[in-house]
Image: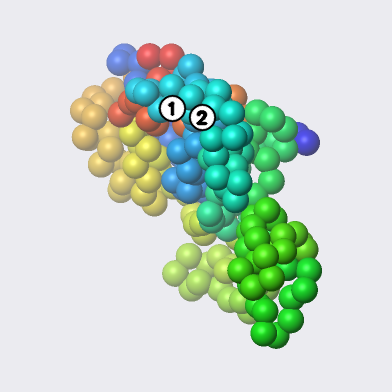
Amino acid sequence: MATPKVTLKLLINKKTNKVLFAEAGKDFVDFLFTLLSFPLGTVIKLLSKNRMVGCLGNLYQSIEELGDAFFQPKIGKATVLNPKIPFRPSGSTLLLSDGGEDGIGSTTRKFYLCPSYHKNHQHVTDNPQTLCPSCKGTMSNEMPFVNPPPAAASTDKAVGVNSEEGGFVKGVITYMVMDNLEVKPMSTISSITMLNKFNVQEVGALEEKVIELGMDEGLNLLKASLQSQTVLTNVFLGA
């Protein structure tokens, strides 16, 4: 499955070789917010053990090398190495998912029932290896999770967008993403304020650069966000 692409417009100070800020749409901001929902195990899997900061890569490797016999049968090693993402709204951009081994794969939620489920025997689990506390049978009958229908279409008068568009943030609005990934609404006043903050004296020193992000850039952003306060500069300018 093809990895989605996201476009980002950078404003660069050529004299200092720094990204002042990026002009971003809903898709990129949704991607950034999605990163906060990743369990640590997913982050380590995405970056690989050797690219992790600190000792977490070593911890992950030690779990990989432990035999299955050391783990509780109801949990299993795979549960620790491949934790489920607890929440992700429908329609959100996920550059790091390609459905393959290097991505995070599907985030569809599934629940399971005991085969002898009835009104006095109502247990549900998200692990098909779980034993039913009533009959001790394996709860392996799959019940795919169904997202609730969107609320009746409504328009936010303040920004003029439809509430059914999905993801974390509203579209139509343009967002300003700082080099340290701080996010705020874009406006002419905020742009001028940023130029004053960075003491930009010459407009000729500024350069606009359009970037297209795929999975590789998404992984680099994730890694840099754990190490740096100048993420956009590090990833896109190599500085």
Image quarter hosting the C terminus: top left
Residue pictured at 44% horizontal, 46% vertical: 36
Q: Nearer the viewer, residue 221 or 11?
A: 221
Q: Closest to the observer: 78 or 87?
A: 78
Q: Position of residue 80 (x, y in %)?
A: 53, 40
Q: Position of residue 196 (x, y in %)?
A: 22, 35
- State the image coordinates of residue 199 (x, y, percent, origin top left): 21, 28
Direction from residue 150 to residue 32 in the image, left or right: left
Residue at screen point 78% across, 69% down? 115
Q: Which mark is residue 121?
A: none
Q: Label 2 vs label 1: CA separation?
A: 6 Å
**Quarter residue 121 falls in:** bottom right
Tell me which residue sits at (67%, 85%) in the image.
Answer: 120
Q: Is residue 18 visible?
A: yes
Give the residue type at disc 1. Leu
Residue at which label 1 appears: 59
Q: Amino acid at mark 2?
A: Ile
Q: Are marks 2 and 1 in contact (CB under 8 Å)?
A: yes
Vertical placement of residue 69 versus 89, above or below:
above
Residue neighbourhood size for the residue with mark 2, other residues' Cα within 10 Å, grouped as few (<14), some (14–19), many (≥20):
some
Q: Secondary structure at mark 1?
A: helix
Q: Residues within 10 Å of mark 1 (few under 14, many from 20)?
A: few
The residue lying at 50 percent from left, 37 percent from top is 41
Q: Is residue 207 visible?
A: no
Left or right: 22 with respect to 195? right
Q: Is residue 91 left or right of residue 202?
A: right
Q: In the rendered image of this protein, does residue 227 appear above or below residue 32? A: above
Mark 2 residue element: helix
Q: Please give the label number shown on residue 63.
A: 2
